Amino acid sequence: MTEHTHDGGTHQHGQHTPEGAQQRGLNLHEDADNAVDMWDGMYRERPKVWSGNPNPQLVAEAAGLKPGTALDLGCGEGADALWLAEQGWTVTAMDVSAVALERAAAHAAETNHGDRITWQQQDLTEWTPEPVFDLVSAQFLHSPLLPWRDSVASAAAAVAPGGTLLVVGHHPHGLPSWSHHHDTGMFFSPEQLAGALRLDREPWFVDVLTDRERTVTGPDGEQSKILDTVLRATKHA
């Protein structure tokens, strides 16, 4: 959901890609019995995993939207949810990790906007979405335990008529040379995302569907280009 920078790298969090965890020597506990154990284990490795900055694609795509109700999927330590709340959104922030949610709630309590956020622990593999949100943001929901087609389908199903779906993920051919990822099947191109969500059919009007290059800092301080796949679509009322 949110893109963050911490010492030595720029990575994603929550139920997102484990790339940052591996680069910083964090243990993702991929042999855990379930997603809760895996992601709680990762967060316990460090008192603060991410920088606290909102994802730049979220800021770029949601800044002009009229605030309403928002769902932040895989909220991690809460930077995206806090940014949305600051813009006037009423936010449901969802993550599988209780450790991440506890940190996020603590950060929110230090702001003037924390009362606009509801923190909810949920394993997305067991979640049944309802189409009630004006904005659903799914940022880097890459997980070895959750196929990306399932996560984006759940995100789309939670968008209310007239609402906005925002999906951002790693492009499979746009990872930096220092990435530890070898399973590019966890990632998706704009064409793959469009096909999975059947964006050529009702009920979607596609506002943005592209890959977008940005610069990230590697674990040794080197600068690299990386590709994000970005979708913003409106569900017909």
Image (tube, rainbow, N blue to C red):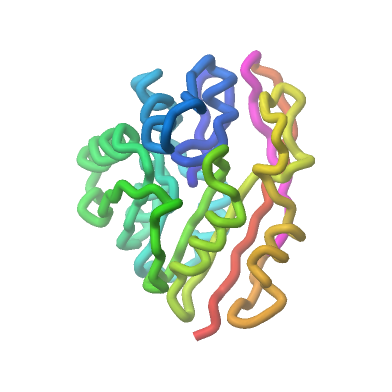
Image x and y of residue 221, in percent:
65, 17
In the image, the segment drawn in magenta is 209-220
Image x and y of residue 171, in percent:
72, 45
Determine the residue positioned at 39% across, 57% down. Answer: 127
Determine the residue positioned at 59% across, 48% down. Answer: 147
60 in the magenta segment = no
Dominant secondary structure of the residues highlighted in magenta in the image: strand
Residue reaching furthest to the right: 173
Determine the residue positioned at 25% across, 41% down. Answer: 105
Image x and y of residue 43, in percent:
39, 26
Image x and y of residue 39, in percent:
42, 32
Q: Left or right? Give the position of 4 relative to 214.
A: left
Instruction: Write down the quadrant of residue 142 in the picture.
Output: top right
Q: Is residue 72 above or below residue 129?
A: above
Residue reaching furthest to the bottom: 237
Q: Is residue 195 above or below residue 183?
A: below
Q: Left or right? Give the position of 175 relative to 76.
A: right
